[in-house]
Every structure is written in C-alpha cells, then in structure tokens.
Image (spheres, coloured by chain):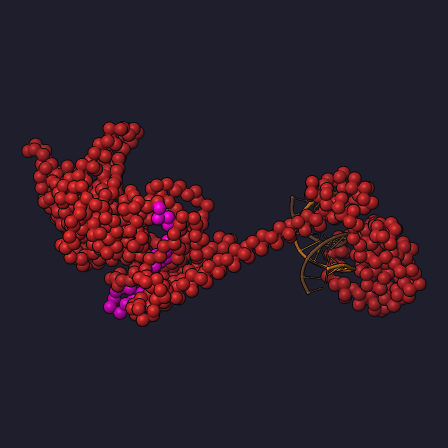
Chain colours: A red, B brown, C orange
Amino acid sequence: MSFGGFFDNSPNGGGRVVTDIPYSNMPAAGALSQQRLVSPSLAKSMFSSPGLSLALQTNMEGQGEMGRIGENYDGGLVGRAKEDEYESRSGSGDMDGGSGDDQDAEKPPRKKRYHRHTPQQIQELESLFKECPHPDEKQRMELSRRLSLESRQVKFWFQNRRTQMKTQLERHENSILRQENDKLRAENMSIRDAMRNPICNNCGGPAMLGDVSLEEQHLRIENARLKDELDRVCALAGKFLGRPVSSLGNSMPHQMPHQIPNSSLELGVGSNGFDALSTSRWAEMFPCMIARTSTADVISSGLGSTRNGALQLMHAELQVLSPLVPIREVNFIRFCKQHAEGVWAVVDVSVDTNRESQNSASFVTCRRLPSGCVVQDMPNGYSKVTWVEHAEYDANIIHRLYRPLISSGMGFGAQRWIATLERQCECLAILMSTVPTNDHSAIEPADVRVMTRKSIDDPGEPPGVVLSAATSVWLPVSPQKLFDFLRDERLRSEWDILSNGGPMQEMTHIAKGRDQGNCVSLLRASAMNANQSSMLILQETCIDAAGSLVVYAPVDIPAMHVVMSGGDSAYVALLPSGFAIVPDGPGSGTGPNEPTADSKPNGTTTQISVGGGGGSLLTVAFQILVNSLPTAKLTVESVETVNNLISCTVQKIKAALHCES
DNA sequence: TTACTAATCCCTT
DNA sequence: AAGGGATTAGTAA
C-alpha cells in the first residue's frame, strides 16, 4: 500500500500487514501532479520495457502511487515486505511482469489487494454515521481502535459515505424531475392533440373539418403556430430562470381552464401596431382593461432598435370595470418576434413568481396560459390582428351576474382585446388625420387627445382624501339603450345631481370614432342661481363590441381656459366618475353595428334573467373629494354620503327607464 | 455491463 | 491540516 499499510481483516487474511511503503517517502505534491498525466496502462507498458525501467525507477523513487501501480500490474507483487520494496527501488529491474510472476509462483497464494470491511465493521460505522455523519477526530480514533481499522480508513469511510449519500439524494431528485417532465410532456401532447382534433362546441362530437369555415381553419393554423412559438419561449425563459417553465399550467383545485375563440380583425394600425402591442403603449392602448402594468425584467431588449426578439418579464393587473369581478394579477413573460416580412407576434405566458399573492374578493392571482397576438400587414394598408387569450380562473369568485359575460370571453377574452383595439385604432386614425396647429381658438384635437388619455390613464388628481365607490346592477334594458340614455345631456337631470335639476348643454363635441358614441364632450350644467357661474363637465363616452363607458369629471373653469388656450392639460385636476355598461351575457352585443332599437320584448322586469337575456350590467362608480387635507380621516358620514349618492343614482336611472323592481 | 466501495489526488477553507 | 470533489481501481451482481 502506498500509505502506512493496513491490517487485512478478511477471514483468510489474519491481521497481517500486507504492504508498506513508508508514508514519509511520499513525494512532493508537484512531482505527484506531473505524474498524474501518465495513465496506468501507459505506466504499465513503460514498466515492462527494460530499456526504460532504470530511468523510471530513478524518477519515481519512493512514489507511493507508482509503487502501487507497479504492484497492481506486475502480476501480484502484493504483500511485499519492506525488503522487497527496497530491493525494487535499488534498481534490480524486477518490476517486469515476467519476473514478478516467477516470484509469486514461489510464494503461497497471497491475499488479493481487494478488500472490504467486514459486515460487523460496516454495521458499527453505519450506526455512528446515522447519529453523526461528521465525527470528529476523537470519535474516529475511538472507532478505529474498536474495529481494528486504521483511523485513516475510518476517515475515508465516512468521507465516501457522505458522498454516497449526496449522490443518492441527487439521483432521487433527478428521478422526481424526470417524472415531472414526463408528466408535462404528456399533458402538452394531449392538449396539442385536442387542438388538432377539435370538438364541436354545439354538439360535443368531433368537429368535422367541413363544419368550420375557411377562416376558422386559418385561425387554427395560426393558433398552432403561436403555440409552437410559445414552446420556444418557454424553453428560453426556463433557461433564463434556471428552472423549467411550462407553457401549460397545472390545473389547480377550483380552477377551470378557460379557452376563448380567437378574434381576428383588420385594423388600420399599420406595422407600428406591433410596437403598440408589444410594450410601450400597451397599457395606453387598453386603458379600461389594464389597471396597472410594469416590466419587472428585460431579458432581451430585441435586435437593434426593433423589438424583434425582445423578451421580458412583466406584471399586469387586468380588470373588468365592476366591483363584482376581481382584478386579475398576472405575471408573465412576453416575447416579441417578427415572423416574416410584415408578420409580427407578441406572445405572453405566465410564469410562477414568488410574489406574495394577495388574493381577495377584489384581487386574484391568475394564470395566463399561452396568449398573444399576431399582427400581419395587409395589402390595403391595414393590419390583420389575430388574438388568442387563454386563462385559468376560478369562476366561483366572480359574481353570478358577471359569469356569463366572463365565460363568453367579453370580459377578459380575445374579443374584448380586439374590440378595444379596434376602437382605439379608429380614434388614433382620427387624431392622426387632424394636423395640430398652434393658432387655435377652441379645443383642438391635439390638446384634447392628450387630455382624454390622461383622464383615463393617469389623471392629475386633486390632492386630498378621495372617496371612490362603485356598484354593479343588472338592468332589463339593452346596453345600447342604457348607453344612449346616460350620454344624452338633455336627459342628464334625470339622474345627475350635478345638473342642478335642469338639462345640460353640450358645448364641444369631438368625435373619436365612426360611432357617435365615441366622443369627448364638454357639458355645461345650468346655473343654480344667477349669482353662481355654471359648472363644466368634461365627459368621454366610448362604445365597442365588448361594452361601453360614460365617464365624466367636473372641471375648473379657469383650468379649462388654460387648456383651451394651449396650456398643459397634465395640471388639470380631474376626479372622474361614471358608468360602465356590458351586456349581461353573450348574444346581446352592443357593437356599433347593432341596431339601436331594442326589439326584444321585456315582459318580466322583476325576474332577473341572467345570461344573454338582452339586459345590461351597469357599473356605477363615483369619486368624491372628501377633504382636501391629505391627512384627514375618513368619516362614517362621508361613506354614507357616497353610498347614498350611488343608490339614489341607480334608483333614478331605473325609474327613468321604467324598470324599477 | 453497471453499481458499489475503498482509496487517492488535489484543491479550498 | 482537515474536508470535500473528482477520480481511480478492484470487484460483485
């Protein structure tokens, strides 16, 4: 042995010292490390060459390692006594395998070098290991004495045992990961299969290819392409995060996978639509849908100045404008890619982050499965936008009133994104076509554009304690009728206390789309008395296939003058209130193409029929400035005030539309 | 072959 | 110097 030798405790060994090279003869580390470059087999062949042996002997004098190799390979020169060692070191040349065999043949069969500790020894070692995998020197000495093992052997044993433990653990972990991986792969495959063999939504049977329109088939292909893109994104994201990211979520208890058909639309946004949908103007594009958004991390900012290849970790809060529908918090990775000339894709997929989820009645963490859009340039200068939205959500936390709407996709689904996008693009087109000029006497679109965006996105708010309150109710009137009623300034006195009991006058009207309902207007209430100046109200209304809004805020007349003469609208304090109107379910859309007249008979007004009954879900939201001191406390009285305000307003609306229950 | 184990080398602490 | 990671070598299943 290279070190001080050991006792052979095997049954036929009898505790004899089998080999010994004095430990003190170990070479310096430098010599050893050089030696390691030689492989055992090479060493063997070198040793068996007589011509080389002398030089090598000199070189390797006293090297325990080579001594061992010599023993191992020269045919059983084991158990050599010290004298033998000295003999060989003296250069007698008997390192040669042949001569070694001769020597061996004379001696009785020696114990092989292979050795294992006895079961008793192992048992003792194991029992100590169980208590203490890191015994100190004293414990090891004690054990070595008891087991007749060298303390070095005990040390090695523990060392090896620990590494063994570690590899076992690793192996176990690996097998778990592999299982998980297999499971995800299987799930992935089955979902992909399901996509390929779609089930008919109407009858539940397999959908015949002939059943679906050519357009739908195109959408399916688009969908599959998006899916492939997602898989690549997930792989990339996983590499970045150092853990696997699945593009398909594990269904959690009480969560229902929810799929919404794709929406497709041709938009006049041109190729810069890609830019708008990818990052910077995302939140501005969908102000009513995105309550808040931020980019947590930019993994890749894209190639050059384009957004192509951009990969970022994002956070967003998505909303439906009603207190009865919790805001959805989503954390996702967004990948932007130019597919081909004139084709761009923006793909989002949820990742699990360790962010504390603050789930409550009004806030819920939601998983966004592969979602996104493809923007495709069309020959007519428009862009075709295909939107896919997949999300997993718990239907139970959504109020019964809103479930049909949400499950139809008009709440968080592709339809709503597309409807909003269409409306916004229309508005942009109008604003773009009006070249802003500096010498304007009235409100110019350029000014208004900034102002109206701000009023929704980031209003300059008056300082102080603001009280906001909102409620949602079902009304047996069509969304269009309700919308038309609320935005009619001549009927304002029927519900608005700001009207002072009289009609309002529309002073300015700026169209933001083809539909009359998409506009910004400035209203003037009739004066309470001769001494008082009349109040101004800035109002924006909008309508698209997904729903409509009437939002208004009283404005300061001096501030309005500043804005109208070209001042900065960012300094105008706005505290908006208003209404959000959505259909009570699918099939009663309020799109601009829908007939205004409600032809549906509404015989039963007392019975609340939910689900595409042609009625509306009205959300009323009020904000009032309770106190202009930011330090002021909220009082019970002010809460009651705003509550009264809301319920009175709802009652008045119901009365005016003849639908009191 | 693979799995296991005793031991070694070499590096970090 | 001690401990640990990587590696080696002998052997069993």
x and y, in percent, of residue C4 in the image: 67, 48
Q: Is residue A299 visible?
A: no
Looking at the image, residue A18 sits to the left or right of residue A612; the answer is: right
Q: Please provide percent x and percent y for residue A71.
A: 83, 60
**Which region shows up in magenta?**
A371-396
Q: Residue furthest bottom?
A: A210
Which image quarter is the N terminus of chain A in? bottom right
Estimate the x, y position of residue A126 in percent, counting from the top left. Answer: 72, 45
* Nearest to the observer: residue A232 or residue A47: A232
How many numbered dots are placed on residues in this image? 0
Rendered residue at 23%/34% (across/down): A643
Taking the magenta stretch, the answer to whether it contains residue A201 is no
Residue at 82% x, 42% y is A145
Magenta stretch: helix, strand or loop mostly = strand
Q: Is residue A455 left or right of residue A29?
A: left
Q: Quadrant of residue A198?
A: bottom left
Q: Nearer the viewer, residue A176 or A498?
A: A176
